[in-house]
Image (cartoon, rainbow, N blue to C red):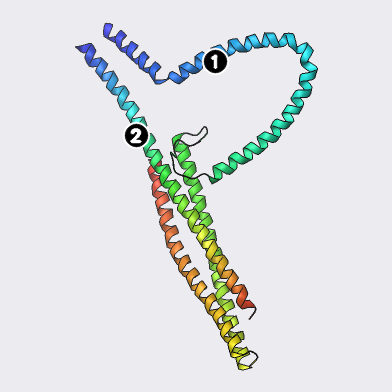
Amino acid sequence: MKTIKLLFSVIFLLTLLGSPQIYAQGKGKEKKLEKSQQKKSEEVKQKGKEAKEKAEKESNKIKKEHKQKGEKVEKEIKAKKEFKGDGNAYGRNKGDLSGKEFGKLRSQEALEKIEEKQENINISEKTLNEGRERVKKAKERLEKQKKAKEITDEEAREKEDKVGKAEKKLDELEEKIKKQKEKTKKEKKVLKDITVKDED
Amino acid sequence: MKTIYSLVLVLFLFSSCTDKKKEEEKKMEQTIQKIDSLEQNISKDIEELKDITKQVEDNLKEIDSI
């Protein structure tokens, strides 16, 4: 019997140690209640006299606060979007989310980012295809101008340089697209692995 | 002796529970860091792709006037 009592007391102590914040919050609430009751009684006495003045002041205050809050919220949203620096990711402001929920949210965001990248790759591919066509047409026009002797040799050389430069850039873009496509595949796989591990 | 044994057992159980929770948090922290770094790389790639595409478009505009 003694052992059981002792065990219970130890478990009780450990529970108390494990939740000091709850205990502290409880005490804090009691104190707050007492204070608020005292304040209320004082306020009731003064309310009659100050009601008119307060109403005016409060309406002004509310207007100002609304403006400030709007600005603050906008800033917070911006900061959240932009902040991706080093530091403790788990300890970042994750609101009411649990660790797992926060992790899932982050992986969802990363997936959206991959989709955004895929869209950009598609846009670049479209530019590449259109660009090849435009270079082809420009070459044809240049050949015609040269044959008809509409331009001097120097002008022709300048235009050929421009076309060459554009062609080189298109090759560069093609290479980049190729690399990014492969990289995106890998990134999708990595994210999938992380998510699977997260679910385990 | 029995009491000491029980006490040690309770303490052991308590510490193992705490350790497990910490381990899970650490694991989650690592996962989130991996996701963060992946996202950063993706953003960088998107920017690079946009830059080179813009350069290509500028060059193409020049040759359109030929």
Helix or strand or loop: what does disc 1 sit on?
A: helix
Which residue in the protein does label 2 denote?
B23
User: What is the total number of numbered labels drawn onto the structure image?
Assistant: 2
Is the Cβ of the residue at disc 2 closer than 8 Å to that at disc 1? no
Quarter occupied by residue A56: top right
Quarter occupied by residue A158: bottom right
Most extreme residue toward the right is A52
Helix or strand or loop: what does disc 2 sit on?
A: helix
Q: Residue at x 44, y 47 (%)?
A: B35
Q: Residue at x 72, y 10 (%)?
A: A44
Q: Classify the position of the N terminus of chain A by image quarter.
A: top left
**Residue A79 at x, y = what percent?**
56, 42
Front in this rendered view, residue A111 or A71:
A71
Q: Chain of mark 1?
A: A
Front in this rendered view, residue A101 or A87:
A87
- In the picture shown, does residue A36 fall above or below A192? above
- In the picture shown, does residue A170 fall above or below B28? below
What amino acid type is highlighted by mark number 2? Glu
Quarter occupied by residue A157: bottom right
Q: Specify few, some or many for label 2: CA neighbours under 10 Å numbering under 14, 14-19, or 20 or more.
A: few
Disc 2 vs disc 1: which is toward the camera? 1
What amino acid type is highlighted by mark number 1? Lys
**CA gap, disc 2 and disc 1:** 33 Å
Front in this rendered view, residue B54 or A113:
B54
The label shown at residue A184 is none
Q: Chain of mark 2?
A: B
Q: Residue at x 47, y 42 (%)?
A: A104
The label shown at residue A29 is 1
Judge from the rendering whether residue B13 lies leftward or rightward of residue A86; answer left or right. Answer: left
The reply to whether label 2 and label 1 mark residues of one chain is no
**Residue A59 at x, y = what percent?**
76, 26
Q: Classify the position of the C terminus of chain A by image quarter.
A: top left
